[in-house]
């Protein structure tokens, strides 16, 4: 078996693949939807966008500012997870390192 | 031009040339030239990404848009900020693992044919040049407005600086020019926001009240719709912004300038922080401009709003602050155009010269020479175009680059990285259709066709200023349809590629 096949058929790699897919796609989709709600509301829900939440801060600006928190939050979450993925990947590479490459 | 301006400019020019001299002594391998040999730290690279990304169009343009049109300007800045999350989540690390110097390397890691190489080189080249020339034109006009020196001189100065940075100092010089630009730019907008706040005694309600008095829109200032007529326009623009960044070659090649994936992530986190804080401050400055200067005066001086920030600086801090902000605008311009020159150079000298003409067999020295000559040629051509286009309105092309990137590079890159059934036919179909659809919609749209002010004096075929809502799905769809017209790849080809993309383990095709 070649190194590629060894890694490919290993349980660890299959698991890494699954957990990575399961992590990035939902976040990406939710985030794109959350983002597209902004132009949709800006275009079609004007009364809501101008309603005052507190003081003279409107909902529209508040929703806009919320992206700072959401985007940074998700970025940190990703970085935290990705560190784990990297560790997994390093372990896998170590286990099936070039030196042990089969015939 | 008075003495204060002159000193600021000389200072910037001298500093950046010293950096270039230092970088030129190190820049003696291709890896140094194209990627600074991966030697930047994540934080440095993040600063450089921000420097690459925040153009004068967004520094002055966004502030102007917020000052004149309120909420619509704010929507722009949110789009610029959030697009980095897409880069981080989907493409950053695979690109680092798969490629060497160019975006073509990534796609050709899965589809290693000359055709694909051509396609990627041409698209990267078109996108970078489409972005570069209008930036140069805008820069020339801006410097003329700010400093009252003539257009030809300012284009020549900016054009020769960017060419010198890239041709002699490669990626290392470009990166450091961008890092310095980011620091100076952030310092400048921070200072300006502080002055705005101190003028209103830190009372935000007071600021908002003054804004309402200053603007002509009244209540509507806080609503979308002043800059874009229809909701479709806003949605279309938002889509292009969030997906476009992940298809811009000059941003994506910055994934190679760091050592490993940890640093890649740190780069993007840093860039997001900086870009986020920057756009937050543009909001304050935009508000400040309309509060202290008023809509009418802003509009009278320059109807595009580009001078809102400089005017505010003059109002609040006199000529000295104005000179400082103008110098920052100048630094911003040279840093961005240098980034574009190196990206176009990479597409030509690495993809076309090295991989296609020399079939991957040229020596380090040959490649380095080719890269330097290419940078010089691109610099000259861009300057000539910019000089010829002085009186043509091309500045709208800057924001449309995002649409072109989002409908050609992005779909192909995304499918290449994640979709098993994708194949070369799909990639080429997606790339060609995405490019042609977005460029055609642009050509037939109201930017180009206008009975009074257009390049083509007749009624436009459609009324969308931002054609992303049609062009982006067209790019994706043609990539999908193209894939189904050809046979799927052999089973393990994609998984080999996938393994390398996500672990960095080299599972090359030739391995038995």
Image (cartoon, coloured by chain):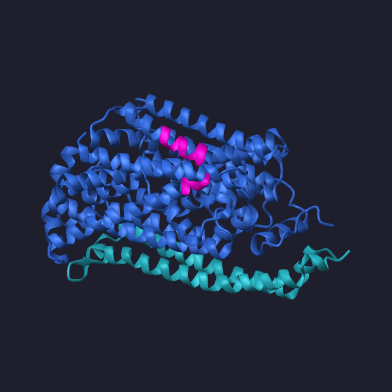
Q: Is residue B50 left or right of residue B148?
A: right
Q: Is residue B301 left or right of residue A20?
A: left
- Expressed as whole percent of the image width and height from the top left, the position of residue B512 reads 85, 57
Q: Is residue B493 above or below residue B367?
A: below
Quadrant location of the C terminus of chain A? bottom right
Residue B167 lies within the magenta run: yes
Q: Residue at x 19, y 36 (%)?
A: B2
Quadrant location of the N terminus of chain A? bottom right
Residue B442 lies within the magenta run: no
Q: In the depicted view, which residue is nearer to us: A69 or B235?
A: A69
Q: Residue at x 65, y 59 (%)?
A: B501
Q: Is residue A96 left or right of residue B118?
A: right
Q: In the depicted view, which residue is nearer to us: B29 or B444?
A: B29
Q: In the depicted view, which residue is nearer to us: B351 or A56?
A: B351
Q: Which chain is blue?
A: B
Residue B127 can be seen, yes or no: no
Q: Which chain is cyan?
A: A
- Please identify the residue farthest to the right as the structure is shown: A103
- Expressed as whole percent of the image width and height from the top left, the position of residue A50 reads 22, 63
Magenta stretch, residue numbers: B160-175
Q: In the depicted view, which residue is nearer to us: A37 or A21?
A: A21
Residue B41 can be seen, yes or no: yes
- Expressed as whole percent of the image width and height from the top left, the position of residue B371 reads 58, 36
């Amino acid at each position: 078996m070649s190194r590629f096949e060894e890694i490919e058929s290993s349980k660890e790699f299959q698991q890494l693949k699954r957990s990575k897919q399961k992590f990035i796609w939902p976040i990406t989709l939710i985030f794109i939807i959350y983002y597209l709600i902004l132009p949709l509301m800006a275009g079609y829900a004007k009364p809501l966008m101008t309603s005052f939440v507190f003081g003279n801060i409107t909902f529209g600006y508040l929703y806009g500012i919320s992206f700072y928190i959401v985007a940074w939050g998700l970025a940190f979450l990703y970085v935290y997870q990705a560190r784990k993925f990297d560790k997994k990947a390093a372990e896998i590479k170590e286990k099936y390192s070039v030196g042990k490459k089969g015939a | 031009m008075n003495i204060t301006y002159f000193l600021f400019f000389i200072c910037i020019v001298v500093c950046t040339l010293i950096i270039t001299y230092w970088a030129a002594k190190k820049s003696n391998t291709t890896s140094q030239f194209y990627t600074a040999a991966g030697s930047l730290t994540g934080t440095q690279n993040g600063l450089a990404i921000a420097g690459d990304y925040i153009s004068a169009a967004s520094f002055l343009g966004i502030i102007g848009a917020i000052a004149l049109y309120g909420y619509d300007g704010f929507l722009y800045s949110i789009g610029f900020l959030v697009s980095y999350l897409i880069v981080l989540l989907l493409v950053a690390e695979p690109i680092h693992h798969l490629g060497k110097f160019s975006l073509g390397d990534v796609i050709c890691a899965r589809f290693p044919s000359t055709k694909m190489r051509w396609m990627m080189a041409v698209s990267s080249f078109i996108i970078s040049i489409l972005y570069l020339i209008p930036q140069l034109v805008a820069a020339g006009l801006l410097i003329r407005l700010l400093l009252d020196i003539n257009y030809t001189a300012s284009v020549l100065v900016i054009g020769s600086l960017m060419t010198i940075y890239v041709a002699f100092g490669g990626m290392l010089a470009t990166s450091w020019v961008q890092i310095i630009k980011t620091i100076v730019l952030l310092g400048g907008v921070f200072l300006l926001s502080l002055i705005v706040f101190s003028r209103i005694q830190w009372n935000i309600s007071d600021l908002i009240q003054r804004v309402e008095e200053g603007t002509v829109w009244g209540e509507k200032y806080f609503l979308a719709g002043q800059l874009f007529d229809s909701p479709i326009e806003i949605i279309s623009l938002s889509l292009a912004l969030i997906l476009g960044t992940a298809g811009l070659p000059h941003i994506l090649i910055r994934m190679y300038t760091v050592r490993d994936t940890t640093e890649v992530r740190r780069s993007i986190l840093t860039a997001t922080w900086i870009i986020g804080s920057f756009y937050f401050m543009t909001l304050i400055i935009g508000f400040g401009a309309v509060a202290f200067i008023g809509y009418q005066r802003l509009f009278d001086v320059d109807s595009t709003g580009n001078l809102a920030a400089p005017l505010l600086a003059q109002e609040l801090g006199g000529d000295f602050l104005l000179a400082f902000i103008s110098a920052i605008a100048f630094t911003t311009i040279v840093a961005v155009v240098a980034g574009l020159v190196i990206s176009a150079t990479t597409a030509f000298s690495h993809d076309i010269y090295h991989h296609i003409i020399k079939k991957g067999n040229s020596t380090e020295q040959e490649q380095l020479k080719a890269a330097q000559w290419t940078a010089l040629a691109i610099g000259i051509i861009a300057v000539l175009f910019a000089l010829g286009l002085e009186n043509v309105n091309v500045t709208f092309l800057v924001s449309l680059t995002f649409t072109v990137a989002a409908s050609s590079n992005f779909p192909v890159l995304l499918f290449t990285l994640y979709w098993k059934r994708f194949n070369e036919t799909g990639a080429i179909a997606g790339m060609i259709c995405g490019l042609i659809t977005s460029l055609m919609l642009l050509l037939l749209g109201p930017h180009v066709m206008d009975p009074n002010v257009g390049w083509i004096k007749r009624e436009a075929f459609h009324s969308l200023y931002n054609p992303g809502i049609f062009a982006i799905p067209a790019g994706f769809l043609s990539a999908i349809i193209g894939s189904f017209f050809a046979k799927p790849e052999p089973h393990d080809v994609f998984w080999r590629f996938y393994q390398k993309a996500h672990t960095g383990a080299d599972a090359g095709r030739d391995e038995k």
